Amino acid sequence: MDLGKIIIKDINKVLSHQNMKHVLEGTNKLYKESMEQLNLEAKNPDGKPRTRLNPSYAKRKSKERQGGVGGASTGFANFVLTGRAKKSLKGTVVTSANSLDIFYHFTDDQANEYMYINEISDPYKKERRQFPLERDTRSSRQKDNIKFVGLMIQSLLTKERRIIVPQESTNELVKV
């Protein structure tokens, strides 16, 4: 086996599911915190402010907030998770033979249905979102997250380790 193949094999081993699990768990934590911060600021994942709620609905939501139930007292859809939604938002790290993924979902069925309608279906076409999409990766808010994930992967790749390369002519082992 030539040196290039040995190095590629080593990199694949370092980036294996077992080694990447802690990176994915760190990524999960980072994105949940980022979503919560953007929600508090009433901004979409790209950092742009969400569209305002209509005045009568904003007033109703503000009253709910004062009662400790939830709501958007600023007049913006803030998606600040309270109650059952806050308790049930989970980021699940899933590893399989061909992929490493994080899936966000709400374990409470009612919260999941409500958030799905508002996030995915977008019945009022307001494009108020909290979960980042591929198109958001160009925004400065998401670039910061991506940079941090890159640093976690870089840390994993730059950990000190030894690669042993067998020399073909003498069958001696050479440490690199």
Image (cartoon, grey):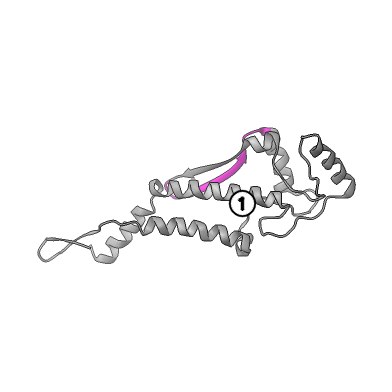
* Residue 148 location (% of width, % of height): 51, 58
Vertical order, 117 against 48 (above or below): above
Q: Residue at x 65, y 33 (%)?
A: 108
Q: On the picture, is 161 further left or further right than 123?
A: left
In the image, 163 versus 40, the foreground residue is 40
The range drawn in magenta is 97-109
Q: Residue furthest left?
A: 170
Determine which residue is flagged by label 1. Answer: 34
Question: In terms of secondary structure, where does tag 1 sit?
Answer: helix
In the image, 169 versus 157, the foreground residue is 157
Is 104 magenta? The answer is yes
Q: Residue at x 59, y 44 (%)?
A: 104
Q: Residue at x 25, y 58 (%)?
A: 163
Structural crowding at the residue carrying mark 1, measured as other residues with C-alpha within 10 Å and reported as few (<14), some (14–19) or many (≥20)? many
* Residue 71 location (% of width, % of height): 78, 41
- The picture quadrant where one finds residue 7 is bottom left
Is 146 magenta? The answer is no
Q: On the picture, is 75 further left or further right than 46?
A: right
* Residue 52 location (% of width, % of height): 82, 53
- The picture quadrant where one finds residue 114 is top right
In the picture, the quarter occupied by the C terminus is bottom left
Q: Residue at x 68, y 33 (%)?
A: 84
Tell me the kind of residue under disc 1: Ser
Q: On the picture, is 71 further left or further right than 55?
A: left
